Amino acid sequence: MTVSRLLATVSVCGMMMAGAASADPFSMGLWGDMPYAKADDAPFIPALIADINASDIAFSMYDGDIKDGSSECTDAIYTDAITMFDSLSAPVIYVPGDNEWTDCHRTNNGGWDNLERLSHIRQTMFNTLDTFGATKMPVEHQGTPGEAYAENTRYSRDGAMFVGLNVPGSNNNMVVDDAACTKKSERTAEQCAADNAEYKERDAANIAWLTESFAMAKDAGDMGIMIVLQADMGFDIPETEDDDESRLSGKEGYAAFLDALMAQTEAFDGQVVLVHGDTHYFKMDKPLPNASHMLANFTRVQTFGSPNVHWVKVDVDATTRDVFTFRPMIVAANAMKSLPN
């Protein structure tokens, strides 16, 4: 048994003994998709950090994209992100986005091997059991620190579970054809084949982590589970009988994960929240239907992102019907921020 799995076992046993009746309310934060150099976000980050630090939150989760999609994937990008995360007083759980690994093969990103950048993220940003933040806390990781799937995390508190998953934009690193392989890129056929192999293995690992998390939440009597990832998996276009964005070309890489999420949500008695970034505007809705009806216990939250340098506060109370209450937090000093000319 790994140290991380042992930590999870001890945590779950403790929750089961405590019971849902002992759950105390608390708050946490959600943010991501910033700072972007092309939007001149950096001068506005201190006000954001100060606003989060002034709030009473237990921890925050960052849902990916530590840089914009047209800047280079240099080592400094990751160390700068660590510095930003560590400037927060409370722990920060980081979830990777496409801009910092999936898209690094692009010519305007420096033409990196994106799988090497993923390995670098794991070795640099997931090399311990601890979160980021001035105050750190251990969380469970699917993989051994520094190795494959160490970026998939899990943390439980007071009747609610929080799951971080590496499900990035750009079709989850799935390459559907030769045109997708070479778009904005000089990738070779061999590199694209390696990307597809990585996608298949990680997609299976993500679904296994998701399934195990729901099982653990049920066993612990948790009343809510929040899943945090980066990709908008196809929620922007209104679904009709003829048009389901999640099934359009360029979204194939999310199909199996979405099917698993739907099945697990239907089988869970509590509230399920999917949090993602990617498209940068705050939204909250219930977009995930099954064949015959809306999934009433499922809520989708999309966080702010560049150039909107704000965050979302979540009040968590497992003794209430909805468990999670969301409040968009507009940082006053950043309210009039606009794109540079």
Image (cartoon, grey):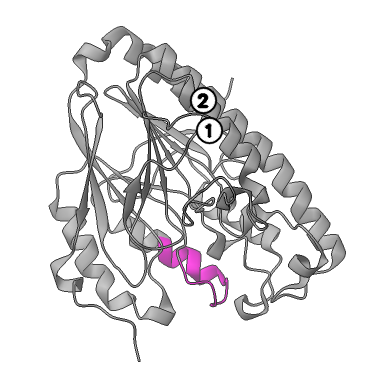
Q: Is residue 34 above or below residue 261?
A: below
Provide the residue designation for mark 1: 261
Q: Within 10 Å of the Cα at label 1, are there few (<14), some (14-19), or many (20+) other Cα atoms?
A: many
State which quadrant residue 72 falls in.
bottom right
Q: CB under 8 Å between callouts 2 and 1?
A: yes
Tell me the SS state at disc 1: helix
State which quadrant residue 335 falls in.
bottom left
Q: Which mark is residue 264?
A: 2
Quadrant location, the N terminus: top right
Which residue is rendered at x = 82% and y = 66% of the image?
A: 178
Q: Is residue 147 visible?
A: no
Q: Mark 1 belongs to which amino acid?
A: Leu
Q: Is residue 323 above or below residue 168?
A: above
Say whether residue 122 is left or right of residue 49.
Answer: right
Q: Is residue 85 above or below residue 156?
A: below
Q: Where are the magenta residues, as a range? A: 67-81
Q: Is residue 327 magenta?
A: no
Say whether residue 122 is left or right of residue 44.
Answer: right
Q: Mark 2 belongs to which amino acid?
A: Gln
Which residue is rendered at x = 54% and y = 65% of the image?
A: 99
Residue 169: % across, % down: 56, 57
Which residue is rendered at x = 50% and y = 71% of the image?
A: 76
